[in-house]
Image (cartoon, rainbow, N blue to C red):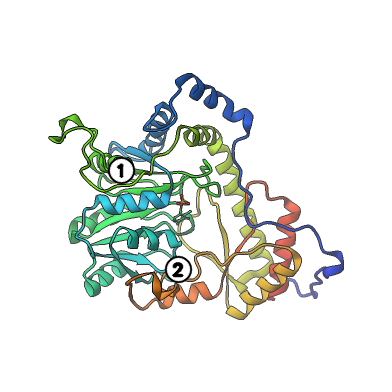
């Protein structure tokens, strides 16, 4: 730990602003072969050729990590993917679904919009994800029939452990891996994983998402629900064109698929950059701040899109937030308010005690993180954090 006093530039020498996120999407040149394909195909939506080839490529990415055959359906957003995956479970209306408290709002809106009741439960104090013990306890107390897990900040869930949980308890599992493409893989047949291709994620299409699972029936059901619920299967016993469920229009367009293809072409290179930036950023902060910072434990993310630090005291977090604001360095309290702290008017909600999530959230702050983050910018942020916490 350095002993000399740290000086920090005052407002008069205020440097350039550092944004929180800078999306990194393919440019016009990278898009052009895919746009040419659209011009040639004259197919723009409704499970077109670019969507089909994208689903195939994505399934192959997951296939590398498992012997179970993997199937993918694209959707217009991960939020729609969560809604349709929840609907595809075909639980009785009003059934309860356990959600971890430290979470993006999409899990909450999706659960409520499909007529299910969220049960907000705590997370592991070190890894910040839900554990089977917490989930089982929460389900016992609430009667929940499903758990919508979150790969929090890219921290992958152990899918074999959760598949065992699912078969042992009969409680259905869905994984929200919206911002965890490249970190969350799947090594079981019966758990759907939902991924986002929003502009701020590591595989960006602007808007979009997909659901991957080894259960081909589940994937077909989600595909049908993404197209209003219209039956297109001649072998189903129902006439083609008949509505068999009330779905939504949640299809990915060919244009979004074009962007996703071009993003996927460079995804691996960018993941390497994200990973090494993350490592370096963390090392420099550890070096500068030592035991004043706490970190999410577990597996280092393969393709991080969010960079968080956890301070020891809420007052330090608030202080850092204020100083960063003065310096034009953007920060974000990711996933706050916690799911149980939103307006009570949003709908019925079952809240269990969440001391770990509340403790973590009170001292958590997201710092600027993006592929084009420069060395000087990292140094400025590190210096500011050091100034705020020591
Ligand atoms: C981004 C994100 C979503 C929403 O994804 P969209 O594709 O924007 O709907 C949901 N959950 C988590 C954890 C996310 O990070």
Q: Residue furthest left?
A: 237
Quadrant the N terminus occupies? bottom right
Q: Name the residue under label 1.
A: 228
| Residue located 59% across and 64% down the image | 332
| Residue located 61% across and 47% down the image | 23
Q: Residue furthest front?
A: 242
Q: How crowded is mark 1: few (under 14 residues within 10 Å), some or many (20 or more)?
A: some
Q: Which of 257 and 173 is in front in this view?
A: 257
Q: Which of 352 and 363 is in front in this view?
A: 352
Q: Mark 2 points at which residue?
A: 126
Q: Nearer the viewer, residue 129 or 335?
A: 335
Left or right: 145 in relation to 206? left
Q: Earlier in the sequence, mark 1 or mark 2?
A: 2
Cβ of mark 2 under 8 A from ligand 1: no
Q: How many marks?
A: 2
Q: Position of residue 193 (x, y in %)?
A: 35, 48
Instruction: Kindly report which numbered mark, 1 or 2, lies closer to the viewer in this rendering.
Output: 1
Q: Quadrant of residue 243?
A: top left
> Which SS class for mark 2?
loop
Residue 8 to residue 191: above or below: below
Do we see residue 158 in this rendering?
A: no
Q: In which quarter of the image is residue 28?
A: top right
Q: What is the spatial separation of the Cα atoms under label 1 and label 2, in whole angstroms?
A: 41 Å
């Amino acid at each position: 730990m350095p002993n000399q006093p740290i000086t920090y530039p005052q407002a008069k020498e205020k440097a350039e602003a550092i944004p929180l996120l800078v999306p990194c999407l393919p440019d016009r040149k990278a898009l052009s072969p895919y746009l040419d394909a659209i011009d040639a195909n004259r197919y723009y939506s409704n499970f077109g050729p670019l969507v089909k080839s994208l689903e195939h490529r994505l399934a192959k990415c997951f296939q590398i990590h498992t012997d179970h055959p993997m199937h993918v359906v694209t959707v217009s957003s991960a939020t729609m993917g969560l809604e349709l995956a929840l609907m595809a479970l075909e639980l009785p209306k009003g059934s309860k679904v356990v959600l971890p408290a430290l979470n993006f709002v999409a899990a909450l809106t999706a659960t409520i919009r499909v007529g299910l009741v969220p049960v907000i439960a705590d997370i592991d104090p070190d890894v910040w994800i839900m554990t089977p013990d917490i989930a089982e306890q929460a389900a016992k107390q609430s009667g929940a029939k499903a758990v919508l897990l979150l790969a929090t900040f890219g921290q992958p869930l152990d899918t074999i452990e959760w598949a065992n949980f699912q078969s042992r308890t009969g409680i259905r599992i869905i994984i929200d891996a919206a911002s965890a493409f490249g970190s969350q893989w799947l090594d079981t047949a019966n758990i759907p994983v939902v991924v986002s291709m929003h502009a701020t994620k590591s595989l960006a299409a602007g808007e979009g998402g997909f659901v991957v699972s080894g259960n081909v029936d589940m994937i077909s059901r989600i595909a049908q629900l993404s197209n209003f619920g219209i039956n297109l299967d001649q072998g189903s016993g129902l006439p083609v064109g008949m509505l068999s469920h009330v779905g939504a229009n949640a299809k990915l367009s060919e244009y979004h698929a074009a962007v996703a293809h071009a993003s996927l072409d460079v995804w691996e290179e960018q993941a390497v950059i994200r990973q090494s930036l993350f490592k370096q950023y963390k090392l420099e902060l550890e070096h500068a701040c030592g035991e004043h910072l706490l970190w999410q434990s577990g597996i280092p993310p393969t393709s991080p899109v969010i960079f968080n630090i956890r301070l020891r005291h809420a007052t330090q977090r608030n202080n850092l937030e204020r100083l960063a604001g003065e310096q034009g360095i953007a920060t974000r309290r990711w996933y706050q308010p916690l799911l149980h702290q939103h307006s009570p008017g949003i709908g019925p909600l079952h809240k269990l005690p969440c001391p770990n999530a509340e403790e973590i959230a009170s001292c958590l702050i997201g710092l600027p993180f993006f592929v084009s983050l420069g060395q000087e910018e990292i140094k400025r942020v590190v210096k500011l954090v050091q100034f705020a916490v020591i």
